[in-house]
Structures are given as structure tokens and as C-alpha cells.
Image: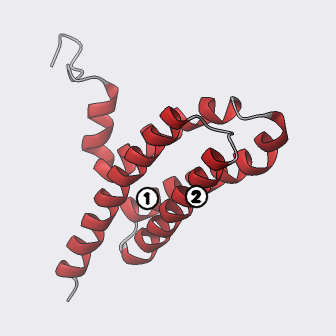
């Protein structure tokens, strides 16, 4: 901690401690995604780009619900489904040349990380259920 009482790790680390790693991972992904979609060709920015952004925000919202609701299984399954949709939408964006290979690889790695975190959270929740 520094003199102001804030964590020396910065706001991202503090956010992860409050919200959990899956939600923080998805948040970082959406933060990267918004400017990335702005670079899509105009012909796809408002169709495929908007669909990708809406799906990512939906996954983020489901993870927020899972963080604060007692029944976590339903929002976690919905978040997991949204992440799977994003994988296919990004593949489509890459195949349509809306996204270069470097950005596609970044998205794939970020979605894999988030998907693993959500899957682990789901398994933990199932193990704790009576």
C-alpha cells in the first residue's frame, strides 16, 4: 500500500479482489474490445461489431449477477454460453478480414482465460451445492 491507502498494484488488482478473477478478466476484455471494434470496416462495424460488443457486455452482466446473487449457477452458465458465442463471432470476424490475426489471437487467448475462470467458478459452485 502507498501513503494514500491504495494498493500499489493499481486499480485492476484492487478490482479483482473485490469482484473476482472471472469478472475482472471479462472487464479487461471488454475494455480492449471497444476500441478494437472501432477499427472494423464500416460494412461490419454496425452488424458484426455491434453483435460482438453486445454479447461481450451480456457476458460481463451475467458475471456481475453471479457475483452478487445467491444462485450463481444460472448466470455462470449464461456467461459461459456468451463466451462460446464470442469465440465463434471472433472467428467469423477474422475470416471476414474485419480483424487481423494478431487481434484475433489476443481475443482467443483472453476468452480462453475467462472461460477457464468461469468454468472453475462453476465447478466450485457445484461442489459447494447441497
Residue topped by disc 2: 58
Horizontal side of 126 relative to 95 (left or right) equals left
Query: In the image, which disc is placed on residue 63?
Result: 1
- The quarter of the picture where residue 41 lies is top right
Q: Visible in this render: residue 116?
A: yes
Residue 115 place in picture, x, y as percent? 37, 59
90, 63: nearer the viewer: 90
Residue 70 place in picture, x, y as percent? 35, 73
Q: Visible in this render: residue 20?
A: no
58, 41: nearer the viewer: 41
Residue 62 place in picture, x, y as percent? 49, 62
How far, Cα to Cα, is label 2 from label 1? 9 Å
Horizontal side of 51 relative to 15 (left or right) equals right
- Which structural element holds mark 2? helix
Residue at the spot x=48%, y=33% of the render? 102
Query: In the image, which disc is placed on residue 113?
Result: none
- Which structural element holds mark 1? helix
Q: Quadrant of the N terminus?
A: top left
Amino acid at each position: 500500500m502507498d501513503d494514500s491507502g491504495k494498493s500499489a498494484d493499481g486499480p485492476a488488482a484492487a478490482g479483482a479482489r473485490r469482484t473476482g478473477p472471472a469478472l475482472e478478466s471479462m472487464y479487461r476484455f471488454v475494455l480492449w474490445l471497444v476500441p478494437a471494434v472501432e477499427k472494423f470496416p464500416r460494412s461490419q462495424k454496425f452488424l458484426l461489431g455491434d453483435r460482438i460488443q453486445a454479447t461481450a457486455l451480456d457476458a460481463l452482466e451475467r458475471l456481475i449477477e453471479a457475483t452478487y446473487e445467491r444462485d450463481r449457477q444460472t448466470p455462470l452458465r449464461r456467461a459461459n454460453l456468451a463466451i462460446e458465442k464470442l469465440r465463434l463471432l471472433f472467428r467469423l470476424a477474422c475470416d471476414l478480414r474485419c480483424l487481423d490475426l494478431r487481434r484475433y489471437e489476443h481475443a482467443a487467448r483472453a476468452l480462453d482465460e475467462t472461460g477457464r475462470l468461469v468454468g472453475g467458478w462453476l465447478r466450485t459452485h457445484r461442489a459447494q451445492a447441497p
